[in-house]
Image (cartoon, helix red, strand yellow):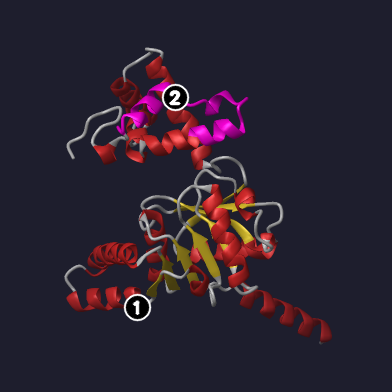
Amino acid sequence: MTNFAILKRAFSTTSTRNVIKNVTVIGGGLMGSGIAQVAAQNGNHVTLVEVNPELLKKAEASISTNVNRVAKKLYKDDASATQKFVDAVRGRIQGSTDPSGAVQDADLVVEAIVENMDIKHKLFKSLDSAAPPKTLFASNTSSLSIGEIASVVNRKDRFGGLHFFNPVPVMKLLEIVRIPEQSEETYQAFLEWGKSIGKACVTCKDTPGFIVNRLLVPYIAEAIRMMERGVASPKDIDTAMKLGAGYPMGPIELADYVGLDTTSAVLNGWYKKYPDNPLFEPCDSTQKLVSQKKLGVKTGEGYYKYNK
């Protein structure tokens, strides 16, 4: 009887601790607003943090547009059900320009700000002292070390990577990144929450690019190097991979879509940290295009020209 009571108490305590209901998302850009939307659509109460009211208003408008789109797909011609869904989701999201205040009752904080280690360190250092002990911390970084980001906080056992993919409401994948200090309880909480918001979760160690980008970025870079060596044209390389490998988009098209500035920044960062790895060597043509502000689809020209 005593053993059962102990087991019951332990199970109950763990289950309670693992429940994530209040989520704070820091950063209302494309990724942050998408994370906030998905969390709210699946019943979480979300606080979305931006640096000023104007950016917050822009993020909230983007979420409203996207939630309306989701509602119309779900309920088609039922205007009443559509509006009820939109109101419910929007009602679960509140905005804030005060990061420290926004984490006071957070079960989970997801950071989705600029890919700059110093800025992330400054943010998490302040949040570490402001958030209650229960709060889990996660970064949505796609290229920086989770362990290095976590180095400034005391709760390393409650820290990890939650790498979503763009656009967040559409892409099913969530990479859960573990650091050695992360507790099993924290990992299970991340896993349970990821599943609860409709994501297919995969797990990996804290390695450059995690799974997807660790394979994808060198693949893009090698395709660009092939072009630079005169092996084939960008169009022929892209056509070959689409028709020969069944990829929906060729590697050089993908670089333009992601943004050549982003691709270049990731390679430069990895190469600086791991100069002996030839897969991470930056591409001359990409750097030249970036210097010319030809960043791909978003500027109308990269390796290809686009009608804006």
Q: Where is residue 294? Give x, y as percent.
A: 30, 32
Q: Is residue 159 left or right of residue 29?
A: right
Q: Where is residue 190? Give x, y as percent.
A: 57, 62
Q: Nearer the viewer, residue 106 or 57?
A: 57
Going 33% across and 68% down the picture, which residue do you hit?
A: 53
The furthest residue to the right:
2
Q: In which quadrant will I find the N terminus? A: bottom right
Question: What secondary structure is found at the residue carrying circle 1?
Answer: helix
Q: In this view, does 130 lie to the left or right of 97?
A: right
Q: Is residue 259 left or right of residue 213?
A: left
Establish if 154 lies above or below 230: below
The mark found on residue 219 in the picture is: none
Going 50% across and 74% down the picture, which residue do you hit?
A: 101
Q: What residue type is labelled 2?
A: Cys
Residue at the spot of label 1? 91
Residues in magenta, as a range: 267-294
Residue at the spot of label 2? 283
Magenta span dominant secondary structure: helix
| Residue 189 in view | no
* N-terminal label among 2 and 1: 1
The furthest residue to the bottom:
1
Q: Which amino acid does label 1 sit on?
A: Gly
Q: Where is residue 223? Give x, y as percent.
A: 41, 24
Going 17% across and 36% down the picture, which residue do you hit?
A: 307
Nearest to the eye among marks 2 and 1: give it: 2
